[in-house]
Image: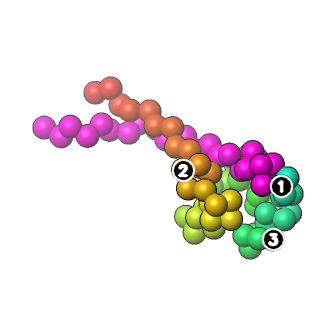
């Protein structure tokens, strides 16, 4: 019998706005420039309307000098069956 829980749903949130504020209040445009994307991409990621590539997620974590799981947080719902 497989003891691993079956994942029903995964919701990903982020702390980008808080990290920007705590990193000298850098703007969305500054973050975009430093990570090589547009400001609109940063806005969409912050609002949870777009999920970055793994590479971009790691670039953001590196820029903020924090582990990836401090930037993006996964919330899992397990299937009870």
Question: Residues at badges 2 and 1 in contact (C-beta under 8 Å)?
Answer: no
- The image shows residue 21 at horizontal and vertical percentages of 81, 48
Residue carrying label 3: 33
Tag shown at residue 16: none
Secondary structure under tag 2 reads helix
The residue range painted magenta reads 1-23
Q: Is residue 71 visible?
A: yes
Q: CA distance from mark 3 to mark 2?
A: 22 Å
Q: Residue furthest top?
A: 80
Residue 30 or 67: which is nearer the viewer? 67
Q: Which label's residue is closer to the chain start, 3 or 1?
A: 1
- The image shows residue 27 at horizontal and vertical percentages of 86, 57
Residue carrying label 1: 24
Left or right placement of residue 8 versus residue 65 in this view: left
Secondary structure under tag 3 reads helix
Left or right placement of residue 21 versus residue 16 in this view: right
Q: CA distance from mark 3 to mark 1?
A: 15 Å
Q: Residues within 10 Å of mark 3 (few under 14, many from 20)?
A: few
- The residue under the point 59% across, 49% down is 70
Residue 71 or 23: which is nearer the viewer? 23
Is the N terminus in the top left, top right, bottom left or bottom right quadrant?
top left
Residue carrying label 2: 69
Q: Is residue 60 visible?
A: no
């Amino acid at each position: 019998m497989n003891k691993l829980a079956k994942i029903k749903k995964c919701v990903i949130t982020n702390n980008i706005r808080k990290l920007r504020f705590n990193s000298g209040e850098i703007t969305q445009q500054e973050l975009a420039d430093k990570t090589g994307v547009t400001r609109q991409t940063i806005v969409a990621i912050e609002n949870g309307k777009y999920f970055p590539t793994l590479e971009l997620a790691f670039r953001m974590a590196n820029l903020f000098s924090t582990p990836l799981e401090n930037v993006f947080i996964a919330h899992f719902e397990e299937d009870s069956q």
